[in-house]
Amino acid sequence: MKLIHKTIIAWIVLAAAVTVTVIGMKYLYLSLSSADWGSAKGRILNIHIRSEKSTSTKRYKPEVLYTYTYLGKKYSGSRIRFGLSLGTLEIAQQEIQKFTEGQVVEVFVNPQNANESVLEKGGSPLFLFAMVLGLLTIFLAVNIIRKHNSKSG
């Protein structure tokens, strides 16, 4: 493959890696900061498992719809915790077993954005993994670009 093609691919990979790293940093920050969020009483409205087919595998995501009142205003949310995403049916069923429709729950609310809430503080180490993978990919892409610039300059 010509060096110019490798460089173009490296720029594309670099853009994707920066995006993944920034998103990973954002959600890692939110999952860590949720430990300091205030709480409000809420109520579970609906519980279900959504399925999605990706390639040949079916993946499942637990979804819990709830309402809560924070500082006198009513909100709704559906996030159990940061980093909970598509997985096996067994994992999704395990996650929703903790909740029942009509259940009164403690909802943790972002004081800077009351529309943002979780039922469980913290998050998944997946964000840290995404950041590390993104940073490694950025490093590799930058090295490929530097090689091209040194050979063409």
Image (spheres, rainbow, N blue to C red):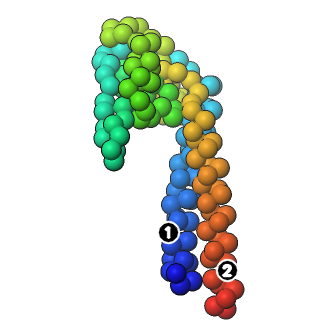
Residue 78 in sight in this render: no
Give the residue at mark 2: 147
Residue type at mark 1? Ile
Q: Secondary structure at mark 2?
A: helix
> Based on the displayed image, in which of its 4 quarters is residue 76 positioned?
top left
Q: What residue is shown at x 60% (from left), y 55% (from top)? A: 134
In this view, 131 is above or below 36: below
Q: What residue is shown at x 32% (from left), y 25% (from top)? A: 49
Residue 89 in sight in this render: yes
Q: What residue is shown at x 52% (from left), y 21% (from top)? A: 120
Give the residue at mark 1: 12
Residue type at mark 2? Lys
Mark 1 crowd level (few <14, some 14–19, many ≥20, 10 Å Cα): few
Q: Residue furthest front?
A: 56
Horizontal arrangement in the rendering, residue 75 relative to residue 143 (left or right): left
Residue 111 % position (x, y): 54, 29
Residue 127 % position (x, y): 58, 41
Q: Where the C terminus falls, by quadrant?
A: bottom right
Mark 2 crowd level (few <14, some 14–19, many ≥20, 10 Å Cα): some
